[in-house]
Amino acid sequence: MKILIDADGCPVVDVTVQISIERQVECFILCDTSHVLEKDGATTLIFPKGADSVDFALVNRISPGDIVITQDYGLAAMCLSKNATVLNQDGMEYTTHNIDALLLARHTAKKIRNAGGRLKGPRKRSKVQDKEFHTALTFLLDRKE
């Protein structure tokens, strides 16, 4: 088992790497050349810029039972199809039971934006969200042991 982080816009890289070190779980940070992010205790893999280049590289490295951290619903769906466990930055686990609804919501939001509509962006990240992510990842690792 390993942890793979989609580092594009991921606010929980530090927490994830810290937990992976404590639990002695191999951790990879995947990013493109415009978002290089290196942390002690994790291996950074850098890919050329391009539409979904990091996403496809990440999916190609997954083994069943791996843990993926991403906020990208499309990537989450691909990871689930490879029998990975997928968490978002707030600790919500993507599952076969919730991914279809999330993908539909993303599609609907894109249609609204393409029609000229506006949607609210995410709130400023809080310490509570960081704690909830930490709790969820720790619980997930306990469950897999």
Image (cartoon, rainbow, N blue to C red):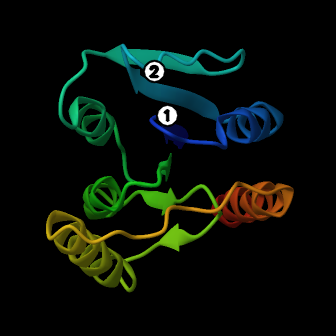
Q: Residue, x 47% and y 48% (percent of image)?
A: 66
Residue 68 horizontal/vertical position (percent): 48, 49
Asked whether disc 2 touches disc 1, contact meaning CB atoms under 8 Å apart, the reply is: yes
Up-down relation of residue 34 to residue 75 (above or below): above
Up-down relation of residue 46 to residue 76 (above or below): above
Give the image quarter of residue 16: top right
Residue 6 horizontal/vertical position (percent): 45, 39
Give the image quarter of residue 91: bottom right
Q: Residue, x 54% and y 70% (percent of image)?
A: 93
Residue 60 horizontal/vertical position (percent): 24, 36
Residue 85 horizontal/vertical position (percent): 47, 60
Disc 2 element: loop
Type of amino acid under label 1 = Ala
Q: Which residue is mark 1?
A: 7
Q: Which residue is mark 2?
A: 35
- What separation in Å lies between label 2 and label 1 (alpha carbons)? 8 Å
Up-down relation of residue 118 to residue 1 (above or below): below
On the picture, is 3 further left or further right than 31? right
Q: Residue, x 25% and y 20% (percent of image)?
A: 49
Whichever of callouts 2 and 1 sits on the residue coming sooner in the sequence is 1
